[in-house]
């Protein structure tokens, strides 16, 4: 590892894609490797997020121009992703079957030393950036590239993957529209986004949704019912309800499929079904639920996400060339720049219930449930 205070170009770096995948990861990897190659930086890639640096034998591969050829339009990550591999809370099972979390960060550091790596390049979401900051505190130079379809990182105006997820969700709403109308049904579409309603709100507006329920605005089911009935009275006997997976009724809590544990978030699921059963209890309409799930994460990235991923990858390689450490690449307005990783951690971006986007939705008669 380089000394903490002398900025000198990194010569060999290890890149990994951690957390859930997001369309555009391959664009980042490709751009990073190409720019790094031109700047004389050797790139290694850890497979499946931190797993490649935590497992024995380690799984780390060289990345050169040949290995990134033809990947720009592909979803997923050529390196693989993992949202289970947390070097600060590795799950170990003892001989008696009991499970415990252990700190495996020293193993990661010794692998980086053995590989002669000057810096770690982390492409990930808020959880990964938190891990990155902990490595920075341990003296490891880290460069972060923000990734999440949820678009919930406060320090960047946008993350790649979000545009693709919103496009897929909009396609789903468009597709549900005709069958909802044909059968006079209430169609509930559950979309991802965890604690942030950006995917629900943007796709709901883009797809002409009638009701959009997001985690930032706990919903009153009676308002939802009243909106559907008012539409029916005006002669529109179908409705499209977009539900962010983290949405919950007033006084309730998000629907959780699997509880979280130290260093690992809970798995959400069931928010759409919950809205549907509350509606069925209160009205005669036929209600159907579609859970869009991982369709939002897969597939080819949109042009926007390919370009944003490429810009982020190039900027990250240039930070490595400058020997900069503890920085996160971000989009500020229309400009790609960087901020301190410490700033990125614990700075979530949520929909403002009274902000411009929510007001726009309400202004065109979309019911937000609260
Ligand atoms: O954070 C991205 C995300 O897709 C969330 O929107 C969703 O809650 C979660 O990941 C799903 O994770 P998994 O792939 O582990 O089911």
Image (spheres, rainbow, N blue to C red):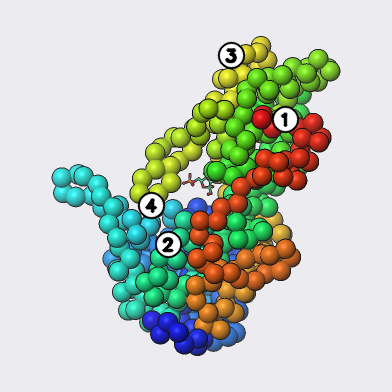
Q: Earlier in the sequence, mark 3 or mark 2?
A: 2
Q: Earlier in the sequence, mark 2 or mark 1?
A: 2
The residue singled out by tag 1 in the image is: 367
Question: Does residue 245 appear to the left or right of 96 in the view shown?
Answer: right
Residue displayed at 78% across by 41% down = 360
Distance from label 3 to label 2 (Cα)? 45 Å
Residue displayed at 70% across by 47% down = 167
Q: From the viewer's perspective, is residue 189 above or below residue 137?
A: above
Can see residue 53?
Answer: yes
What percent of the width, then of the height, locates residue 129? 48, 62
Distance from label 2 to label 1 (Cα)? 38 Å
Distance from label 1 to label 4 (Cα)? 36 Å
The residue singled out by tag 4 in the image is: 263
Mark 4: few/some/many CA within 10 Å (<14, 14-19, 20+): some
The numbered mark at residue 124 is none
Q: Secondary structure at mark 1?
A: loop
Distance from label 1 to label 3 (Cα)? 19 Å
The residue singled out by tag 2 in the image is: 131
Q: Mark 1 near mark 3, Cβ–Cβ under 8 Å?
A: no
Q: Mark 2 near mark 1, Cβ–Cβ under 8 Å?
A: no
Distance from label 3 to label 4 (Cα)? 38 Å
> Does mark 1 have its CB less than 8 Å from ligand 1?
no
Q: Which of the 4 image quadrants contains residue 352?
A: top right
Instruction: List the single residue furthest toward the right.
Output: 234
Q: Earlier in the sequence, mark 1 or mark 4?
A: 4
Residue displayed at 62% across by 29% down = 219
Mark 1: few/some/many CA within 10 Å (<14, 14-19, 20+): many
Q: Secondary structure at mark 2?
A: helix
Q: Secondary structure at mark 4?
A: loop
């Amino acid at each position: 590892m380089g000394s903490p205070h002398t900025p000198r170009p990194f010569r060999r770096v290890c890149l990994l894609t951690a957390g859930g995948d997001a369309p555009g990861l391959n664009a980042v990897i490709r751009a990073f490797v190409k720019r790094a190659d031109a700047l004389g930086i050797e790139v290694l890639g850890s497979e499946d997020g931190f797993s490649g640096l935590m497992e024995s034998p380690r799984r780390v591969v060289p990345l050169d121009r040949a290995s990134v050829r033809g990947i720009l339009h592909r979803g997923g990550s050529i390196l693989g992703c993992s949202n289970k591999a947390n070097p600060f809370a590795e799950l170990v099972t003892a001989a008696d079957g009991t499970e415990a979390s252990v700190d495996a960060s020293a193993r990661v550091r010794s692998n980086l030393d053995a590989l002669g790596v000057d810096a770690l390049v982390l492409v990930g979401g808020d959880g990964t950036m938190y891990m990155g900051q902990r490595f920075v505190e341990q003296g490891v130079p880290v460069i972060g590239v923000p990734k999440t379809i949820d678009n919930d990182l406060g320090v960047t105006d946008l993350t790649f993957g979000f545009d693709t997820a919103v496009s897929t969700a909009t396609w789903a709403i468009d597709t549900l529209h005709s069958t909802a109308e044909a059968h006079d049904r209430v169609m509930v579409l559950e979309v991802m986004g965890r604690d942030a309603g950006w995917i629900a709100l943007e796709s709901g507006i883009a797809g002409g949704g009638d009701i959009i329920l997001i985690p930032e605005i706990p919903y009153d089911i009676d308002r939802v019912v009243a909106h559907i009935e008012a539409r029916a009275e005006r002669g529109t006997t179908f409705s499209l309800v977009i539900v962010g997976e983290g949405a919950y009724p007033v006084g309730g809590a998000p629907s959780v499929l699997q509880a979280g544990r130290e260093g690992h978030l809970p798995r959400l699921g069931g928010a759409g079904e919950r809205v549907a059963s509350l509606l069925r209890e209160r009205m005669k309409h036929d209600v159907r639920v579609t859970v869009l799930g991982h369709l939002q994460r897969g597939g080819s990235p949109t042009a926007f996400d390919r370009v944003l991923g490429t810009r982020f990858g190039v900027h990250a390689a240039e930070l490595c060339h400058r020997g900069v450490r503890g920085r996160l690449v971000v989009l500020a307005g229309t400009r790609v720049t960087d901020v301190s990783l410490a700033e990125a951690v614990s700075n979530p971006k949520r929909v403002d219930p009274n902000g411009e986007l929510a007001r726009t939705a309400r202004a065109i008669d979309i019911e937000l449930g609260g």
